[in-house]
Image (spheres, rainbow, N blue to C red):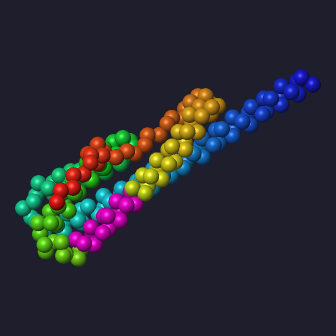
Amino acid sequence: MTTWIIIGVIVLLALALVAMYNGLISSKNRVDEAWSDIDVQLKRRHDLIPNLIETVKGYAAHEQETFSQVVAARNNAVSAQASHDPAAVVKAENTLSSTLKSIFALAENYPDLKANQNFLELQRDLTDTEDKIMASRRFYNTNARDFNTKLQSVPTNIFGRMLGFKDYAFFAAAEEEKEVVAVKF
């Protein structure tokens, strides 16, 4: 009788471990899928930028330094994306976002550019892509939170760490984006 109880406990323990492992794998796959969604949107963003620059160049040819900064930031973002290092991607993408603002600031100085259909369409596409990137980041953060919570909860935290699972980092706003915007009239 004691043997059956021991076997029953071992079987229950094994089933619990399998359930924990499968739960962690399922959550990990959701986080990886969310990261993949971010990758897709970042690629779309990176593909739009050269078209935007070419459109603006025709109107503001003497703004070469601005163009060079945007191209360099885009190239750094593409490299960071290829590295699959979330921290590097966040940093590079925040830099790219900052430099993209300079392109749109240029448009204010060139009324013909602001009225150009290609520029307006690219600006809409880029805005749409930025919105999708934000949504993808929220989706990623939600899945990362769920995975991290599962990994940090007892008893999964003991077995999850032994099996090599690690917490996922969250996407966070860049420091300059956290500053309060001054509104002056």
Please indicate, yes or no, whether residue 32 appears anywhere in the rendered image: no
Does 139 appear above or below 51?
Answer: above
Q: Is residue 130 magenta?
A: yes
Q: Nearer the viewer, residue 28 or 97?
A: 97
- Image-based side of 25 in relation to 141, left or right: right
Query: Which quadrant of the view contains residue 51?
Result: bottom left
Does 158 appear above or below 54?
Answer: above
Query: Which quadrant of the view contains residue 47?
Result: bottom left
Where's residue 6, x and y in %? 83, 25
Where's residue 57, x and y in %? 14, 65
Quadrant showing the N terminus: top right
User: Residue pushed farthest left?
Assistant: 62
Quadrant showing the C terminus: bottom left
- Image-based side of 2 in relation to 149, left or right: right
Q: Which residues are magenta?
A: 119-133
- Image-based side of 95 in relation to 66, left or right: right
Q: Is residue 60 magenta?
A: no
Does 59 appear above or below 2?
Answer: below
